[in-house]
Image (tube, rainbow, N blue to C red):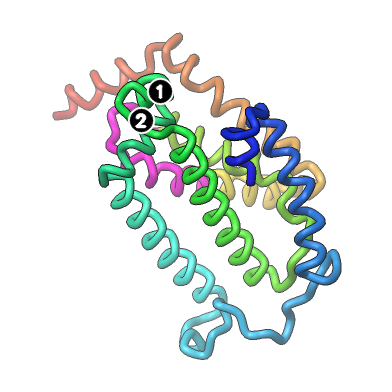
Amino acid sequence: MTGLIYTKGKVPILLAGILTMTAIYSINLRVMGQANRSLLGKETLFTAPFLDFLPKNFPTVMVGLLIIIVVTGATAAFLQTELGQAFIVTGDNRAMARSLGVNTDNMTIMGLMVSNALIGLGGALVAQNNGFADVNMGIGVIVVALASIIIGEVIFTDQMTLTDRLITVVIGSVLYRFVLVIVLYLGFNANDLNLFSAVVLGLALILPQLRKYFKLDSVLRKGVASHD
């Protein structure tokens, strides 16, 4: 829906996304029947009988790792195809993609379809893991997504393959959550998590400039070379 509004209706992408989110909120309420629905006592992916032999909390880790491997592998394999390459070119440079004969409108719609499908998968997994679903549980997720991408990008080198970049996003999300766990462990109020999330995201954005200013990359490379 967002893709059609943006590509065919020529509505700015941000406004198209806001319109779709507003409509989806009502649709979610109709599908769920209420704003909050409990899953307690219901069998979920994390409480399936074939996982009963695992210790407590291990099913969450195992299922999460399996889904990460499948999704990352499938995404990397798709982006190596001819269609996937056209998809990448559209994201990098729409004008060049059009000059190569790529239908950028179709690529944009496809990209939004794939991304929203993955968002839906993530939301379903979070709801099953938490034991409830709420129409407002997606608020603030964009900060987590941005932090995961940026943290992964700034920690690792720029010379990465496409698959490496996908893996760094996963690592970035784990590191981001790890930072929040440390914040709670230190005794800070849970209401301050949004503040710390913004601080972490800000530091991740500033880090590349700090690395250039202090020439950390060259220092690290010299250290590795001398060690070898």
Q: Of 162 and 193, which appears nearest the observer?
A: 162
Inspect the image, locate mark 2, and give the three-letter code of the amino acid beneath it.
Val
Q: Left or right of 212: which side holds 189?
A: right
Picture coordinates of residue 85 (x, y %)? Answer: 30, 38
Give residue 143's position: percent from left, percent from top.
Answer: 65, 39
In the image, which disc is placed on residue 15?
none
Q: Residues within 10 Å of mark 1 (few under 14, many from 20)?
A: few
Is the residue 228 above or below the residue 3 in the image? above
Segment colored magenta: 156-175
Residue 169: say if magenta: yes
* Residue 177 x %, y %: 58, 49
Give the side of residue 183 with respect to residue 28, left or right: left
Quarter of the rendering occupied by the C terminus: top left
The residue tagged 2 is 89
- SS for callout 2: helix
Mark 2 neighbour class, 10 Å CA radius: few under 14, some 14 to 19, many 20 or more: some
At label 1, which amino acid type do we have? Asn
Q: What residue sits 57% from the left and 37% below the top?
A: 147
Q: As rendered, which of 21 and 41 lies closer to the eye?
A: 21
Q: Are marks 2 and 1 in contact (CB under 8 Å)?
A: yes
Percent of width and height locating residue 30? 81, 66
Which residue is at the far left? 228
**Which quarter of the figure has residue 88?**
top left
Residue that mark 1 sits on: 93
Query: Tag 1, which secondary structure?
Result: loop
Query: What kind of secondary structure does the magenta stretch mostly adopt?
Result: helix
Distance between mark 2 and mark 1 Cα atoms: 6 Å
| Residue 140 picture quarter | top right
Q: Is residue 22 above or below residue 120?
A: above
Horizontal relation, residue 137 to residue 125: left or right: right
Tell me if residue 67 comes above or below residue 200 in the rendering: below
Residue 131 located within the stretch drawn in magenta:
no
